[in-house]
Amino acid sequence: MAAITLNYDGRNPVVKNLIYTAILAGATPVGMTDTSALDRALKEVSSGKVLSANPAKNGKKVLA
């Protein structure tokens, strides 16, 4: 199995049709996950990008 990364203009109808045809032919889109805003926020918290959900703390760690 091979993985290919494509960078293209999403407004180009020819490229969109080529990708759609490749998917119909059996290519599997990898990494095209449609995650919800809550899932993305939880991932940012678990990775340490977000320190506080309270904007008054300005991202500083505050001991409760």
Image: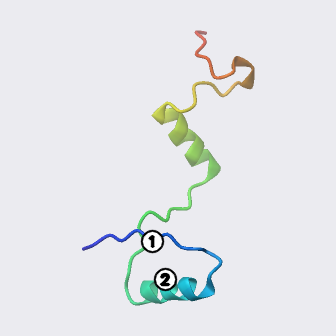
Residue at 57% x, 88% y: name it. 14
Residue 28, how many percent across, how many down? Answer: 39, 76
Give the number of the disc on residue 19.
2
Residue 37, how many percent across, how many down? Answer: 63, 49
Which colouring convention does the figure follow? rainbow
Q: Nearer the viewer, residue 32 or 8?
A: 8
Q: Identify the image quadrant of residue 29.
A: bottom left
Left or right: 45 in relation to 3? right
Element at badge 1?
loop
The quarter of the picture where the C terminus appears is: top right
Q: Mark 2 and 1 residues: CB-CB less than 8 Å, in contact?
A: yes
The quarter of the picture where the N terminus appears is: bottom left
Element at badge 2?
helix
Instruction: Name above or below for residue 64 compared with residue 12.
Output: above
Residue 8, how many percent across, how many down? Answer: 53, 73
Which amino acid lies under the numbered mark 2 shown in the image of this protein?
Ile
Q: State which tag comes first along the sequence, 2 or 1.
A: 1
Residue at 61% x, 53% y: name it. 36
Give the number of the disc on residue 17.
none
Residue at 73% x, 25% y: name it. 55
Residue at the extreme left of the image, as rendered: 1
Which amino acid lies under the numbered mark 1 shown in the image of this protein?
Leu
Q: Nearer the viewer, residue 37 or 2?
A: 2
Residue at 49% x, 65% y: name it. 32
Q: Identify the image quadrant of residue 9.
A: bottom right
Residue indicated by mark 1: 6
Instruction: Name above or below for residue 15 compared with residue 54.
Output: below
Residue 26, how many percent across, how many down? Answer: 37, 85
Q: CA distance from mark 2 to mark 1?
A: 10 Å
